[in-house]
Image (spheres, rainbow, N blue to C red):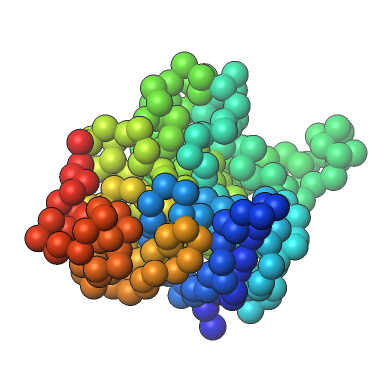
Amino acid sequence: MAELAIENLSLRFGGLTVLDNVSFTVEPGELMALIGPNGAGKTSALNCISGIYRGSGAIRLRGKDIAGLAPHDIARLGVARTFQHGELFPQMSVLENLLTGRHARIGTNPLAEMLFLPSVRRAEVAHRGEIERIIDLVELERFRHAQVGALPFGVQKIVGFARALALEPTVMLLDEPSAGLNREEREDLARFILRIKQELKMTIVWIEHDMQMIADLADRIHVLDYGRTIADGKPDAVLSDPNVLVAYLGTETVQSTIVQATPLP
């Protein structure tokens, strides 16, 4: 059974069609890159999967149709996402921001928390232990108690990535996590993505414009253009597909591949 299956997903805003019968599946532990020119509908697809937008069609998580569920219910089922902008709490520390990502895993009730009962204390120790594990995983140890708003942009992006991990998801939706990062920060991010894929067996849907990263890391690529699927397959085949080259470069000339056209900065 596919971990995530999208079937005939369509989304319209008035007379504007954003997604037009998009279908794809993501297997357990697979890293699938979702690419396309600006305005192709990539982020809208993630918004539908995570419950922010409601389109038509089916969205199945391990066989269960989650289309129409509220975002917090989808999160509880194990779907986490990052955003193009961190959407963090700037006045809070890194540790506190990551703890907010545990909200769907908190099972204690408000009365017990007010009285700070032993069960609450044990749960808090367990949650903090999970957060420390994630901090180690993405190498944020020296920023643990730093105020997020005072951190460099690249570090804030990693904090957003780590906060999504704090949910303990089975599916991660990454929306341009490398945007705005320099070469060193992108290399760190690539290591972290590979680490969660290999060590945590995470299923990942990854929107990305850095084609070199995609060629190096993705198991499969799905390409959207004007809300429609134009290619799906292994990176080598997709990145040399004439339809994909036309969508990105306006030419079918394969001599300049997408990877060569968009090198790392």
Residue drawn at 72 percent across, 48 percent down: 106
Q: Quadrant of the N terminus?
A: bottom right
Q: Nearer the viewer, residue 204 or 76?
A: 204
Q: Is residue 207 visible?
A: yes
Q: Is residue 201 visible?
A: no
For residue 63, what is the image quadrant? bottom right
Does residue 244 appear to the left or right of 256 in the view shown?
A: right
Q: How many marks?
A: 0
Does residue 263 appear to the left or right of 233 in the view shown?
A: left
Indicate the position of residue 187 as horizontal and vertical percent values: 25, 43
Residue drawn at 32 percent across, 34 percent down: 181
Indicate the position of residue 122 as horizontal and vertical percent values: 70, 44
Indicate the position of residue 118 as horizontal and vertical percent values: 78, 41
Does residue 94 appear to the left or right of 247 in the view shown?
A: right
In the image, farthest residue toward the left: 255
Q: Nearer the viewer, residue 228 or 77?
A: 228
In the image, farthest residue toward the front: 15
For residue 10, what is the image quadrant? bottom right
Residue drawn at 39 percent across, 64 percent down: 223
Q: Nearer the viewer, residue 136 or 167?
A: 167
Indicate the position of residue 158 as horizontal and vertical percent values: 42, 37
Does residue 170 appear to the left or right of 221 in the view shown?
A: right
